[in-house]
Image (spheres, coloured by chain):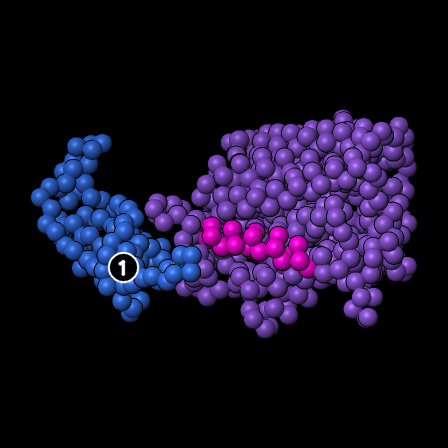
Chain colours: A blue, B purple
Amino acid sequence: MKKIEAIIRKSKFDQVKEALHNVEVNFFSYWDVTGVGNEKEGHVYRGISYSTSEIQRRYLSIVVNDDFVQPTLDAIIKSAATDKVGDGKIFILPVEETYRIRTGEKGGKSLN
Amino acid sequence: MFLKTLLINPSLLIQDTAAIEGDMGMLWMLLSGILVFFMQAGFTLVESGMTSSKNAVNIAMKNLLDICVGSLTYWLVGYSLMYGDTTNGWFFWGGLFQGEGADLFFQTMFAATAATIVSGAIAGRTKFETYAIFTLVMTAVIYPIAGGWQWQGSGWLTNLGFIDFAGSSIVHGVGGFAALVAAYMVGPRIGKYVNGETVPMPGHNQIIATLGVFILWLGWFGFNGGSQLAWGGDDAVGASTVVLVTNLAAAAGALGALITSWLYLKKSNLSMSLNGALAGLVSITAGCGNMTAGGAVMAGLIGGIIVVFSIEFIEKKLKIDDAIGAVSVHGIAGFWGTIVIGLWGVDGDTGIGLFNGGGASQFIAQLTGAVAYMVWAIVLSFIVFSALKYTIGLRVTEEEEIRGLDISEHGSIAYPGKRDRE
């Protein structure tokens, strides 16, 4: 089992969610984050322009069985890319164990 | 010399309906105009509260713009187009820069109200320049000509016996139906209608929306009360009654929508109830000088019930994306508020409606006016938006829309600290 963490553009979220559903990945958590990176955003306040590298993104945390890792990666990369600086990153981490709280099941079954 | 003649002194204007008697009358007009001005704040809060936070600055800009543009264009040409002394009964004119003092101030605020109705319906995807030009045309031409038909004193609707005390049709109907055309022609927000489904796009702050409605309710006491256009003796009693029935209709409208949403949508819903209060206010705006207290309550109540169904119908069946229900609250309720006078309105103690012994003549006059204003608003808006569509365009780009108009159009965001809002 692996955890896939993806930082994506907020505007791409609906597309990514749909792409994940299409590869049977229906369980994940997400939250909005602010971060720094290569993309810069221009603002104007009281006549003064300034650019900030503080950007808004959405952070997805997806735990999947090993055989779902590649399809998930492909789905995210395909749906979240815009070819512009600032599309985001994906990290893969190993997961030791998973449980379903309601029934107490553990392992791969609990991810279905 | 020519310029001097253009800047004619106002005594050349016929203004039967705008004569302000004495100091008290002028005071009442000023105070009422000040209250109506504050409705701009109300609209800003309602519109931004009921839409996405990423467009809040844009809403604020549009609302700031329409009072500013409206104040200047109405001073330049609007007042003249509405109260000028030509005698054909349809189009008035009295030269540039007409009107002065409390009278011009009061009337300017009405023009700005008609214009600001449109900004809410098309929130979130409309180009700022496009809205600016439309506001200019609305306050300079569309609204004043409409107003003249009834309020100049010798307009064709006045001669038909049409009654619209403070503008259910003239202000709210015209604004609401213009909003309908605007929302239709600009098109829905991205993500509103997906695979045949209507996607709810909730506002970001229902508390400021509520505050906005309370401010509008407050301002409406000036909107309706000030339309008495005088104070003292019978006029003081009249204006007081107007303010009273305005409150009754608003309360009834809110409750009507609240109960309707409870029964029909399974939960008592805040934003529907708020729209109900506004619909109640719009519903009494034409008849506030011609309704008994009971009649006002019924008018407001039915307006509040209608608005729930109207919002659902326009959003889900017609699939026109009216971001805040402006078409229903102002256009549909405005139409209702106009014709209800023909159903149970009174003139002093005499019933003038179909259901209280007045026969059909008032009803026909009311229907004629309501339809005339609806058609005027739709046709003129269609012309203006078509011209804009084929010149500068109506919508922002897809990317600008998704990022939010605050950043795209104005380069700043409404809530820099807190960013995880809807």
Name the residue at 90% across, 49% down.
B159
Given residues B266 and B417, the one toward you in this image is B417
Given residues B357 and B78, the one toward you in this image is B78
Name the residue at 52% across, 52% down.
B59
Horizontal side of B228 relative to B140 (left or right) equals right
Q: Does residue B72 belong to the magenta stretch?
A: yes
* Label 1, residues with CA under 10 Å away: few <14, some 14-19, many ≥20: some
The subunit letter for the residue under badge 1 reads A
Q: Position of residue B92 (x, y in %)?
A: 83, 59
Q: Position of residue B326 (x, y in %)?
A: 61, 47
Name the residue at 74% across, 37% down.
B27
Amino acid at pointer 1: Ser
Image quarter where the N terminus of chain B lies is bottom right
Q: Does residue B81 belong to the magenta stretch?
A: no
Task: Give the total of numbered labels.
Answer: 1
Identify the image quadrant of residue A108: top left
Q: Position of residue B353 (x, y in %)?
A: 85, 35
Q: Residue furthest front?
A: B1
Given residues B314 and B129, the one toward you in this image is B129
Horizontal side of A69 relative to B128 (left or right) equals left
Horizontal side of B181 relative to B419 (left or right) equals right
Look at the magenta stretch and give its main secondary structure.
helix
Q: Residue furthest top?
A: B294
Q: Which residue in the protein does label 1 denote?
A: A53
Q: Secondary structure at mark 1?
A: strand
The answer to whether B283 is drawn above or below residue B103 in the figure is above
Q: Position of residue B171 (x, y in %)?
A: 71, 48
Horizontal side of A34 relative to B59 (left or right) equals left
- Is there any visible trace of residue B176 in the rendered image? no
Look at the image and give the residue range highlighted in magenta.
Answer: B55-73
- Is there any visible trace of residue A46 in the rendered image? yes
The answer to whether B286 is drawn above or below residue B196 in the figure is above
